[in-house]
Amino acid sequence: GIIDSIWVQQKKETDTEDFEQVCREISEKIGIKLEPEHRFEWVAFVPRTSSQADIGTLNRYFGKKQSGEFKTAGIETEQRSTCQFIKNSQMEMIKALDRNMKPEDVIKTLENRINKLKTAQVDPDNLVKKRKVSKTLQDYSCNNISVACLKRANKKGLNIKSGQSLKFVVADDKKEGVDRVRLGFENKGKFDEKYYIQELIRAAETVLSPLGFDRKQIKQRIQKSTETKLQS
């Protein structure tokens, strides 16, 4: 269980005990009323730090409800800082996994999304990220993306205060100054393909980590697939 909920799993698929009845029985024993919320066909919990972790994080998961609707919590699709392209891509990966529960289907979907980036088949508006700045420009001690956004905002005559949010596209993540990003209202132009590919791989790792895959293994799968295609 977590702060405001608990997970209940059938011991066997043949168990016919009513879910609502289980909730009532638990409520009577602990003195706290439980309300049944979701019934899943399957659910996957994302490990705490890596695919090698022993325990999944109960508030970071994705799955398919018995109604056929997909449910996600705590992963990239739910994070405000994630751009729409990555959100859509991760949902496609989850749906791919649902078809046959095979990691190969997720890898194939990842490769297709990477190809869209490489061939510029992505609406630049869907690459816009959102980040809340926690300090003023003068208070930052490192040149991270937030600093790049604040510097560019200053250059454009904007006075961004702590707690406000900025929308931006990563133009060149290797740079440290104002050219590292472009703000959401600017002409998006060229984007940093490698940066967004890494974001895709990170989203894929979230989906595949419950199956024991980490980022290194995913990259190896992609490389192997690319080499096979070149040989054929």
Image (cartoon, rainbow, N blue to C red):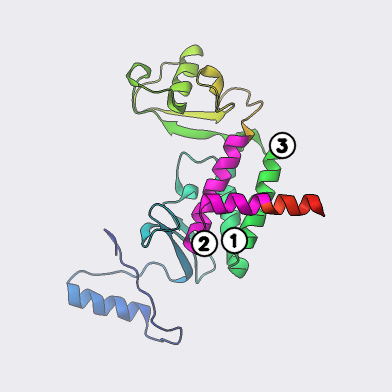
Q: What residue does disc 2 label?
A: 70
Q: Specify the quadrant of the image occupied by residue 97.
A: bottom right
Residue 178 higher or lower than 111, as above or below: above
Residue closer to the observer: 33 or 83 = 83
Q: Where are the magenta residues, as a range?
A: 194-223
User: Cα distance, mark 3 to mark 2?
Assistant: 29 Å
Residue 110 location, x and y as percent? 63, 51
Residue 155 on image: x %, y % = 50, 12
- Amino acid type, callout 3: Ala
* Label 2 residue SS: strand
Dot placed on the residue nearer the N-terminal end, 3 or 2: 2
Height in image: 100 above or below 175?
below
SS label for mark 1: helix
Residue bearing mark 3:
120
Dots 3, 2 in contact, CB < 8 A = no
Mark linked to residue 169: none
| The image quarter in which residue 6 lies | bottom left
